[in-house]
Amino acid sequence: MDVIEAIRSRRSVREFTVNDVDDSVIEKILDAGRWAPSGLNNQAWRFIVVRDNGTKEELSMLSHYGSIIKNAPVLIAIYLDRNEMYDHIKDIQSIGACIQNMLLAVHSMGLGAVWLGQILNKKEDVNIVLGAPASYELMAVVALGYPAQKNRVSERKELSQLVFREQFGQCWQD
Ligand SMILES: Cc1cc2nc3c(=O)[nH]c(=O)nc-3n(C[C@H](O)[C@H](O)[C@H](O)COP(=O)(O)O)c2cc1C
């Protein structure tokens, strides 16, 4: 799939079929993540892949989006390893790029995913459930699987609402 087409057609997927996802597919998704750019090529991202229903059940109780978490075949918890950090903002920005790479890889292979951030309100509890060390700071959980619904829609602000030409206040499109 062409990159621009992938960026434009990717949508968050919150309902999944019962079909399982092969480890080989998950490895391709993680591989796309680790090839993201990072400041100083620091690569402070770490991943915990969850398939176990009991673990998903425990995590589901930590979020408003529990039904997504429970019903997704696979969860990927994405962490910043604070022991490996060189610059908090830049390391976090890099992890955002890593997550977007994974979402695009998911979409390009015909799967679907949603980036879950609300669960960060309970990030310490997530660490306990997953046995993550104190240096691991949760950045997101991505829930993924084969999409149960298609033709999802979303909207974006117009470029004219977002962009200035040369100076603040000057319209991009006249
Ligand atoms: C940082 C971040 C946090 C998000 N947290 C959640 C979440 O907790 N639950 C959820 O259902 N979607 C979450 N989303 C998905 C957004 O709701 C979604 O990307 C947005 O509405 C645009 O829709 P689209 O992805 O289909 O284009 C999050 C996305 C980002 C980037």
Image (spheres, grey):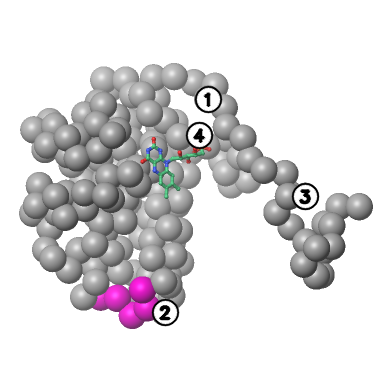
Q: Which residue is drawn at 24% across and 68% down?
A: 81
The picture places residue 117, in percent across and down from the top left corner, at: 35, 47
Q: Residues within 10 Å of mark 3 (few under 14, many from 20)?
A: few
Q: Is mark 1 within 8 Å of ligand 1?
A: yes
Residue bearing the label numbered 1: 152
Tell whether label 1 touches label 3 (CB within 8 Å): no
Of the numbered discs 2 and 3, the one sitting upstream in the chain is: 2
Q: Does the residue labelled 4 lie within 8 Å of ligand 1?
A: yes
Residue type of the residue flagged with mark 1 = Arg
Residue 78 sits above or below residue 116 on the image: below
Residue type of the residue flagged with mark 3 = Ser
Residue type of the residue flagged with mark 4 = Arg
Q: Is residue 76 left or right of residue 4?
A: left
Q: Does the residue labelled 3 lie within 8 Å of ligand 1?
A: no
**Which region shows up in magenta?**
84-88
Mark 2 to mark 4 CA distance (whole Å): 31 Å
Q: How crowded is mark 2: few (under 14 residues within 10 Å), some or many (20 or more)?
A: few
Q: Does the residue labelled 2 lie within 8 Å of ligand 1?
A: no
Of the numbered discs 4 and 3, the one sitting upstream in the chain is: 4
